[in-house]
Image (spheres, coloured by chain):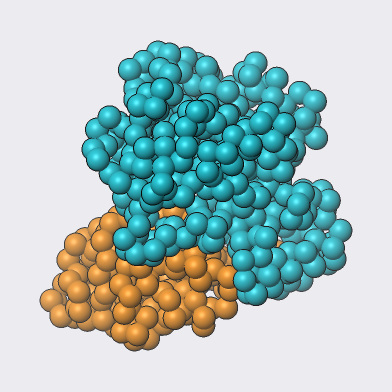
Amino acid sequence: MSMTITEKILAAHAGAETVEPGQLVNVKVDLALGNDITAPVAIREFERIGVETVWDRDRVVLVPDHFVPNKDIKSAEQALQLREFARKHNLTNYFEVGRMGIEHCLLPEQGLVGPGDLVIGADSHTCTYGGLGAFSTGVGSTDLAAAMALGETWLKVPESIKFVYHGELPRWVSGKDLILYTIGQIGVDGALYMAMEFTGPAVEGLSMDGRLTMANMAVEAGAKNGIVPPDEITRRYVEGRAKRPYTFYSSDPDARYTKVYEFDVSKLEPQVAFPHLPENTRPVSEAGDVAIHQVVIGSCTNGRMDDLRIAAEVLKGHKVNDNIRLIVIPGTQDIYLQAMKEGIVEQFINAGAAVSTPTCGPCLGGYMGILAKGERSLATTNRNFVGRMGSPESEVYLCNPAVAAASAVLGRIAAPWEVE
Amino acid sequence: MMIQGKAWKFGADVDTDAIIPARYLNTSDPAELAKYCMEDADPEFANKVKPGDVIVADKNFGCGSSREHAPIAIKAAGVGCVIAKSYARIFYRNAFNIGLLIFESPEAADGIKEGDEISVDPGQGLIKNLTRGEEYRATPVPDFMQQIIAAGGLIDYVSQRLKK
């Protein structure tokens, strides 16, 4: 029977020849992930199960990243719970402040996830690893607790939607724009419970960073997972990096899809999502005159090396506008260090930006850039819900790093070509 | 066990940040989370809601984050159940895992108005609007999810499985 890449990965982990959409399967997980918000609840539930220790100390990964370095006493206590649990169970993959990163930037970088893997994480953006050709999906803390004990979880095999992106992407247009445009087309529940398979020449032309960005926001369309078929770019990324063997899967030519969308993206503009849903997208040239107060470049969506490089390129020779606070947050310590080596951090600071240690921080309204009532932030993050970055009466606009940098210079939502 | 209470209506795509804003996620204490339940959708909700009351919403309820704190906050606030046209998938799983009753019923979501007195028979998936004298059916819960509910939630289900 013909299968999609998602179905093949699920079948392989269910020990089945084939699976089909709608079927409930019990699958082995390659990795189970939690962070400083979700793991404390998972640890509490795990301790109720009555097992001595975790199923595999190499495969339960804890990354404190949301509110660390600890933003307040309660956050410190939550981070402490992770640290103590990691020590008690001798976890290999616990990442302390100073050695950590934003979880979904960190795991691919450290080679902890590879093509063909099945990963669950108590964080909705766990779907990021689809960029590598893995099946990965977000779950809640209780599902994580069960997987920490069993090394298994149950999943309903999702129907798949295929997206084919034709043409070559214009300058300044990135994986972020492809996914924002797609969510704009299908809506925030346009792929509810489904697999989004991203294909076509424009996706094949994306770097790994761009692919991870695309898969990252599949959940913003309601999807269970997003996935990019692995290829030579994938191979080059994982070679010498992957800590476990990996498998390249691909969809059969006659695999079944619930829907197929074909987009010609050769004339696509950078996209901006207006408040308060990621589906409220417009081409940047139609954004109008939107004055902003803060710009954030970072997050599990756009805190990678490609993102910092393009932002620095746009900022070159410019200063951050007097009315703007520009906050740049490299996704991991390695990215931070690389940005320093390339002179990018110096460039940001000289332009008048604040550069932070890795953290999810402002993306979810944690800290490091909270908005007051009436303030607007343009951000390379993933959600622009009411109150997402602070006051319920503030606003968040989403965009790619090039648009973010240009807007930081001009003090309003602006296209990169306006500062060239 | 029957649920009976007043309906509180919400719109489409109610996200987990509206259900429990991240500024309160430095704790996972249910009683603490309950104080801020639905704060960014209706700042007065936690004060107004009475035990057994019902949240009635449009499509894609609980979209966004995977935070289990969202269904925990709703349950701890005393809400009897949630009725919506559809749910975001992680919220749907989480609700079953922690024992918050949720029902999918487009006709109920359309028919029920704010303040209506609602009774729900969870076993039958039958929703009654006592104010308007109307009845609605909820989409049946998949068998496997019913096993989780019958075991008392996912953790008890897993413990029982491990003991076998």
Work out which residue is located at the far left of the displayed protein and give it: B132
Residue at figure coordinates x 62%, y 42% from the top left: A330
Count of all numbered marks drawn on residues in the image = 0
Residue at figure coordinates x 62%, y 71% from the top left: A72
Quadrant for the N terminus of chain A in the image: top right
Residue A275 seen anywhere in this rendered image of the structure: yes
Tell me which corner region of the image, top left, top right, bottom left or bottom right, holds residue A167. top left
Please provide percent x and percent y for residue A311.
51, 32
Give whichever of A133, A143 is nearer the camera.
A133
Residue at figure coordinates x 41%, y 74% from the top left: B37
Give whichever of A350, A357 is nearer the camera.
A350
Please provide percent x and percent y for residue A62.
72, 55
Chain appearing in cyan on the rendered image = A
Give whichever of A230, A363 is nearer the camera.
A363
Tell me which corner region of the image, top left, top right, bottom left or bottom right, holds residue A40. bottom right
Is A143 situated above or below A40? above
Is B94 situated above or below A170? below
Chain appearing in orange on the rendered image = B
Please provide percent x and percent y for residue A24.
54, 47
Residue at figure coordinates x 63%, y 74% from the top left: A74
Is A76 situated above or below A229? below
Please provide percent x and percent y for residue A381.
47, 45
Quadrant for the C terminus of chain A in the image: top left
